[in-house]
């Protein structure tokens, strides 16, 4: 294998891991609360800029800086729950789509006023360090991104499937009314879901910052790729989001290098539309027959 | 009730003919844009308001119309008047071709698939430099002209747009009350029952989608001949969302609502110009408030006010 190929695969995996995190945030919210959150990308951008604030503007060491940014994102999730989710809950799908898009516009322009239009370049905990993998020079940050993303996904998986609170969250996702009758506080589970969404998007934003730039317009392109990832993987499936995210990340990197850098995004959306048409349940199908 | 509404609508349309006498150059340009958007939103009303299809591709179809017009009337030298119907047919055909497979999807799956189409359209328009001009777009699109009389100024072009909107509104109203329009609404209300009544659900959906694209094509063609220039940014996904927002703000499922929404949303930035960069924050927040507190759109306010007045006078 050529050195370039290994580099591309690793950076594809790193970008794909970020898409997987964003896709998971989208799926968690959609499964538990039934809300399609079109402001997910802007939440990623806020996560990234919060780490800019704590890490660059406040000058904290990166450990505390990241922790503080994540705490702020968890709070952001709660605010989002109260201000956006509550009023839009149980409205028709299209109202929710337009409503979350509008909130995305509000968030994006608030970020523009807060942080300005000049992009930041957040530093990585590993700086510009390079690691040798099978004879190829790989940026240490890319490996860090992959490791952290998979650690978070593992923790989330354990939380949802191995803890009592996780079981309650799944119960709410399956049947809200039955869960309420079982004495589960549905509203509390919703808050928790939005906190998790805040943490996932926040982590995605923090990780992606040093790879690209922190730009207030970064949200939409990332969210669009994450949509494509969950469609390809399977809309309500956790492994689907991971596999879909990685496929999209690899397709983006390898497609740009070997096929066409101009059409790399078009390639991703072409695959997404093909999946919607031929296998709408994605790689890891879902049981609900509502889609086709 | 219907007749009174029709009368009121006709009166507004006729009064609108006088507007250019009172509005300055820049205002009339915005008004032209508002009326062109209204045509696209009336089209969207077929797909979304009547047939219930959540589509985020309307700006893409407007773009198809605009680029078809631009290419035909610059590179191929076709008469600008002929390029407009060509754009309508072209956009409609594209919609039917992608609609046939895509319209099997529902809800947010359809939203994401149409979103994918709109994003792909911009990617193609940005990168296919030889045909579509890339990010520079296509310039030098000729203005419309009658023999010996140019329609190039915004004040004169207003009458072209006005006439197009009037015809588009009338056609939409006729379609709404024909069996096609009723079938679309039936599909939205209960797809299974409609299918059971041996109405071809897929055919109706494709018709609604195609019709919305024909309107979008007209809007795109009129836009291209007004600005004399098209570039990918004018047809990006954000504009599809704005069209949908216009329809919901005005009142989905209503032709007059579509027009009102288009005019209100187009003029909103002008009214809020003093806000500067904070404008989009206020705009987004305002839209959200309307969605939450007036889910049937601003036009439903008139009904609410009328009922209040009646209650007071009693």
Image: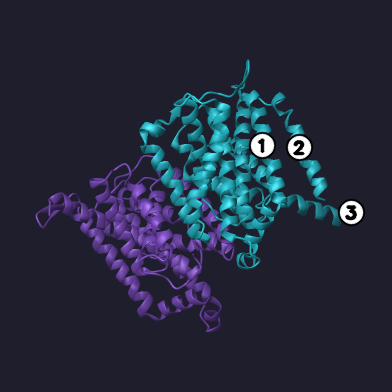
Chain colours: A purple, B cyan
The reply to whether label 1 and label 2 mark residues of one chain is yes
- Residue at 60% x, 26% y is B26
Q: Which residue is mark 3?
A: B313
* SS under mark 2: helix
Residue B111 lies left or right of residue B127; in this view the side is: right
Q: Is residue A239 above or below residue A84?
A: below
* Quarter occupied by residue A96: bottom right
* Residue at image coords 51%, 35%: B66
Number of disc labels = 3
For disc 1, the marked residue is B165
> Which percent across, then down, holds residue B118?
46, 46
Which subunit holds the residue at mark 1?
Answer: B
Asked whether the residues under marks 3 and 1 belong to the same chain, the reply is yes
The image position of residue A171, as x and y in percent, is 47, 78
Residue B58 is tagged as none
Of all residues, the one furthest to the front in this rendering is B198
Q: Secondary structure at mark 1?
A: helix
Residue at the spot of label 2: B12
The reply to whether residue A210 is in sight is no
């Amino acid at each position: 294998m050529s050195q370039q190929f290994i580099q591309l695969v690793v950076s594809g995996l790193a970008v794909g891991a970020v898409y997987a995190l964003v896709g998971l945030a989208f799926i968690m919210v959609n499964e538990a609360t039934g809300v399609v959150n079109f402001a997910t990308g802007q939440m990623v951008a806020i996560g990234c800029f919060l780490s800019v604030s704590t890490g660059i503007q406040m000058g904290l060491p990166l450990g505390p800086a990241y922790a503080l940014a994540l705490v702020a994102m968890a709070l952001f999730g709660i605010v989002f729950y109260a201000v956006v989710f509550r009023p839009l809950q149980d409205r028709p799908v299209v109202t929710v789509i337009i409503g979350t898009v509008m909130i995305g516009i509000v968030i994006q322009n608030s970020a523009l006023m807060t942080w300005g239009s000049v992009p930041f370049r957040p530093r990585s905990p590993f700086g510009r360090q390079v690691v040798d993998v099978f004879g190829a020079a790989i940026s240490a940050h890319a490996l860090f991104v992959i490791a952290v993303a998979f650690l978070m996904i593992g923790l989330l998986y354990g939380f949802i499937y191995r803890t009592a609170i996780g079981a309650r969250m799944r119960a709410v996702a399956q049947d809200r009314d039955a869960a309420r009758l079982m004495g589960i506080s549905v509203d509390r589970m919703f808050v928790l879901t939005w906190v998790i969404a805040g943490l996932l998007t926040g982590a995605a934003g923090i990780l992606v910052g040093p790879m690209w730039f922190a730009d207030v317009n970064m949200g939409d392109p990332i969210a669009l790729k994450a949509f494509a990832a969950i469609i390809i993987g399977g809309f309500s499936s956790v492994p689907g989001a991971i596999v879909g995210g990685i496929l999209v990340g690899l397709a983006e990197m390898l497609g740009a290098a070997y096929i066409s850098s101009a059409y790399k995004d078009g390639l991703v959306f072409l695959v997404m539309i093909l999946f919607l048409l031929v296998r709408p349940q994605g790689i890891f199908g879902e049981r609900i027959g509502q889609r086709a | 009730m219907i007749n009174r509404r029709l009368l009121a609508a006709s009166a507004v349309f006729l009064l609108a003919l006088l507007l250019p006498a009172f509005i300055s150059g820049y205002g009339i340009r915005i008004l032209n844009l508002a009326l062109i958007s209204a045509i696209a939103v009336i089209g969207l009303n077929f797909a979304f308001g009547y047939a219930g299809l959540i589509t985020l591709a309307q700006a893409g179809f407007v773009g198809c119309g605009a680029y078809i017009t631009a290419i035909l009337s610059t590179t191929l030298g076709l008469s600008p008047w002929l390029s407009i119907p060509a754009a309508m047919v072209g956009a409609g055909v594209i919609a039917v071709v992608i609609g046939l497979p895509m319209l099997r999807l529902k809800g947010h799956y359809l939203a994401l698939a149409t979103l994918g189409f709109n994003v792909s359209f911009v990617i193609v328009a940005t990168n296919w430099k030889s045909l579509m001009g890339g990010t520079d777009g296509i310039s030098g699109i000729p203005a419309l002209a009658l023999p010996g009389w140019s329609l190039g100024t915004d004040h004169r072009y207003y009458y072209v747009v006005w006439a197009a909107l009037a015809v588009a509104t009338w056609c939409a109203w006729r379609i709404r009350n024909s069996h096609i329009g009723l079938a679309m609404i039936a599909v939205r209300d209960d797809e299974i029952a409609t299918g059971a009544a041996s109405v071809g659900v897929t055919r109706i959906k494709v018709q609604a989608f195609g019709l919305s694209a024909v309107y979008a094509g007209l809007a795109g063609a009129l836009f291209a001949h007004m600005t004399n220039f098209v570039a990918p940014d004018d047809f990006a996904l954000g504009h599809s969302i704005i069209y949908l927002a216009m329809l919901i703000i005005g009142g989905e499922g209503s032709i007059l609502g579509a027009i009102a929404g288009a005019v209100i949303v187009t003029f909103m930035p002008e009214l809020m110009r003093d806000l500067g960069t904070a404008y989009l924050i206020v705009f987004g927040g305002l839209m959200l408030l309307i969605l939450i507190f007036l889910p049937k759109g601003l036009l439903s306010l008139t009904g609410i006010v009328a009922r209040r007045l009646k209650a007071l006078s009693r």
